[in-house]
């Protein structure tokens, strides 16, 4: 049963027990040893693309779309737990198993969809980081976009110090982001009763095409397809064990890690909508869709010069964090689907240049307004790519011959299948709206 728990990719320094772990440690220390991969995954759920969709949603509709953030986060927790389950049971990531099972033409298609999702994420990171640099230091948007091409060296430098160092830096930056939003929420003084009431979904989210567009943007920015490939790979940085008992314990620790990390990501994403609703919607500014507009208005609305600075710092921090995880995801997707290995520098520069070209063109021709519109559109693209990662994941984790004793329980498979169906239906509604209703 356990013969498939080794793979040819064991030589990958980022995987297969690269982080020190001892089964004889006290349980609290074993749990802490598994903490880290979930936070790298969580970074993708709060990248600059979330900012554009959440700010637009909060300023236009107030607290109404908070339910979308909550539902998307619950979907993410379930799907990422399946990604961890797949890794622990098979010692292979989602892309590798797709290559094992599907014919080449399907794998090439799935690889293309995954690459498109990573490029869409990269576009959001390029634009978001460039806007943050513009707001904080006054750099022209085009110069900021050019500077982002240099971050290909960031992950390479970090990896020299070990994967735990990468995780520690990510968590430290997440703490900075959380501190920024905590201070801003204290300044904004939101209506917490309205926050609680809008955690339950309202029917107009589906029936209003404009609201649905933003809702799917939030979904795409929250449940990111390439994170499923990423998580199923980096879980393997921990020794997963040889026996069924050890594997089950590893699955428990990995699931706890991702669940807590994604709960933290939910709080950050909810904070963006709450801040926009309390600062802009409540004051009648329902037209805030530009990050630069939000930055300039925070000071007069909240009565503090500190608020816009914290806003810009958090935006840059989100962009830097997402850069690291997108780099890893791109490497994992290419190696998993195609079996190709490239220098991480070359791989990162190639992906980043593909993102920089449309971002630079939009910034030059349309300025900040066009850049923010591209941010929202990139998140909708991510939502459209979701089924190509979610459906294979649900299928594989339901197969007892592949998963052994760690096969997903029937109830979990049913819930995950319902999530996949919901995503497909909502994407279908979105395509119909974009095709017919906007003509």
Image: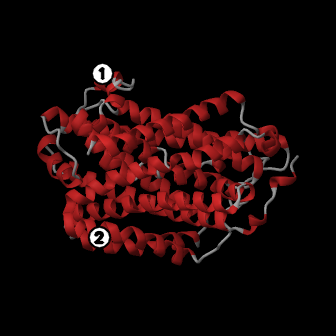
Picture residue at 44% right of the left edge, 44% below the top: 222
Relative to the observer, which residue lies in front, 392 or 298?
Answer: 392
Q: Nearer the viewer, residue 12 or 336?
A: 336
Q: Are marks 2 and 1 in contact (CB under 8 Å)?
A: no
- The span from disc 2 to disc 1 (Cα, nearest Å) is 42 Å
- Image quarter (top left, top right, bottom left or bottom right) of the C terminus: top left
Q: Is residue 272 visible?
A: no
The residue depicted at 14 percent of the width and 47 percent of the height is: 297
Most foreground residue, 105 or 91: 105
Residue 97: image x %, image y %?
71, 55
Of the two numbered discs 2 and 1 on the same chain, state the one appearing first in sequence: 1
- The percent position of residue 133, horizontal first and vertical second, equals 27, 65
User: Which residue is at a point 83% across and 53% down the rendered structure image?
Assistant: 4
- Placement of 189 over or under 392, stated as above or below: above
Residue linked to disc 2: 360
Reading the image, the residue beneath label 1 is 193
Q: Secondary structure at mark 2?
A: helix
Give the quarter of the image for residue 257: top right
As drawn, 402 above or below 119: above
- The percent position of residue 188, horizontal first and vertical second, equals 22, 37
Tell me, for residue 223, which label it has, or none.
none
Side of 89 relative to 195 (left or right): right
Residue 1, image x, y percentages: 88, 46
Dot 2: within a 10 Å radius of its alpha carbon, few (fewer than 14), some, or many (20 or more) residues? many
């Amino acid at each position: 049963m356990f013969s498939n728990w080794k793979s040819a990719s064991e030589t990958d320094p980022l995987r297969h027990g690269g982080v020190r772990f001892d089964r004889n440690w006290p349980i609290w220390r074993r749990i802490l040893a598994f903490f880290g991969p979930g936070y790298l995954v969580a970074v993708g759920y709060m990248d600059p693309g979330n900012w554009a969709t959440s700010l637009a949603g909060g300023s236009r509709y107030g607290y109404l779309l908070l339910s979308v953030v909550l539902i998307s986060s619950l979907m993410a927790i379930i799907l990422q737990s399946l990604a961890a389950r797949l890794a622990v049971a098979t010692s292979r990531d989602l892309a590798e198993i797709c290559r094992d099972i599907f014919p080449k033409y399907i794998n090439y298609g799935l690889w293309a969809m995954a690459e498109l999702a990573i490029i869409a994420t990269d576009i959001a990171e390029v634009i978001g980081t460039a806007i943050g640099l513009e707001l904080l230091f006054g750099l022209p948007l085009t110069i900021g976009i050019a500077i982002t091409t240099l971050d290909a060296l960031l992950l390479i430098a970090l990896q020299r110090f070990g994967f735990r160092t990468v995780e520690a830096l990510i968590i430290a930056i997440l703490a900075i982001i959380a501190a920024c939003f905590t201070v801003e929420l204290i300044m904004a003084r939101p209506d917490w009763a309205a926050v609680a009431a809008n955690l339950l979904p309202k029917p107009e989210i589906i029936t209003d095409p404009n609201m649905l567009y933003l809702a799917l943007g939030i979904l795409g920015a929250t449940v990111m397809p390439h994170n499923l490939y990423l998580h199923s790979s980096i879980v393997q940085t921990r020794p997963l064990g040889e026996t069924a008992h050890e594997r089950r314990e590893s699955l428990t620790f990995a699931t706890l890690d991702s669940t807590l990390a994604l709960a933290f990501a939910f709080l950050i994403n909810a904070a963006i909508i709450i801040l926009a609703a309390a600062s802009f919607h409540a004051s009648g500014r329902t037209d805030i869709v530009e990050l630069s507009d939000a930055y300039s208005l925070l000071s007069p609305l909240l009565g503090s010069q500190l608020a816009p600075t914290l806003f810009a710092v958090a935006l840059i921090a989100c962009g830097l964090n997402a850069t690291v995880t997108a780099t890893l995801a791109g490497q994992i997707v290419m190696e998993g689907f195609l079996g190709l290995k490239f220098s991480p520098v070359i791989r990162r520069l190639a992906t980043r240049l593909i993102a920089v070209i449309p971002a630079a063109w939009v910034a030059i021709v349309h300025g900040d307004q066009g850049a923010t519109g591209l941010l929202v559109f990139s998140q909708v693209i991510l939502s459209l790519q979701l089924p190509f990662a979610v459906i294979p994941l649900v299928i594989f984790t339901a197969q007892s011959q592949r998963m052994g004793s760690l096969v997903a329980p029937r109830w979990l498979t049913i819930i995950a299948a319902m999530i996949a169906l919901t995503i497909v239906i909502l994407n279908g509604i979105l395509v119909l709206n974009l095709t017919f209703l906007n003509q």
